[in-house]
Image: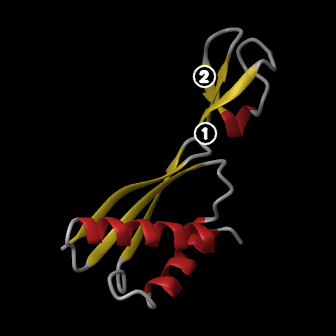
Amino acid sequence: MHELSIVTYVIRQVEELAKENELTKVNSVTLEFGEVSGIVPEYLVDCWNWYAKQTPLIEGAQLITETIPAVTWCDDCKKTYPTVKFGKTCPYCGSGNTWLHQGSEMNIKQIEAM
C-alpha cells in the first residue's frame, strides 16, 4: 500500500507550506492524480483520515481527490487518445509508437487553510 507513503509525503509538504505562510489550521487538501498512477482513492482517503488524526494542523481536514484522465500520444499520426480504452496501440493508425502523455502524475492542487 503506497497510499500511506503518499499521504505522509503530502502532509509533510502541507505542514511546510503552512509554516512558511503562518497558517494555523488546514480545512482541506485537494490532490489530483493520474488515472493510471496506481493510486486507489479509497485507500488514500483511509490513510489520510488515520494520519490526519495524529497531526494537529491537519486534524479534521478533508481530503478531496480528483482524477486526471490518462491520455496517450502517437508519434506516428500525431494524435492523442484515451489510454485506458486503447492501451499502447493507437486506435487511429494502429501504431505502437506511443507514449503516455498524462495520467501517471500526482499533484497537490489546492490547500484551503486559515
Q: Position of residue 34 (x, y in %)?
A: 57, 48
- Left or right, 87 with respect to 32, comes to right
Please tell me which residue is depicted at 22% across the width and 79% down the height of the picture.
24
Label 1 element class: loop
Please tell me which residue is depicted at 71% across the width and 37% down the height of the picture.
85
Instruction: Residue under label 1, please give it.
Output: 70
Mark closer to the chain start, 1 or 2: 1
Instruction: Residue under label 2, please give it.
Output: 80
Q: Quadrant of the N terminus?
A: bottom right
In which quarter of the view is residue 111 placed?
A: bottom left
The three-letter code of the residue at mark 1 reads Ala
Please tell me which residue is depicted at 78% across the width and 29% down the height of the picture.
88
Q: Position of residue 99 (x, y in %)?
A: 70, 27
Compared to residue 14, the image places residue 37 above or below, namely above
Give 26 or 82, whichever is nearer the viewer: 26
- Left or right, 17 with respect to 71, comes to left
Label 2 element class: strand
In which quarter of the view is residue 63 placed?
A: bottom left
Compared to residue 13, the image places residue 74 above or below, namely above
The three-letter code of the residue at mark 2 reads Thr
Residue at mark 1 to residue at mark 2: CA–CA distance: 10 Å
- Left or right, 34 with respect to 28, comes to right
Compared to residue 92, the image places residue 23 above or below, namely below
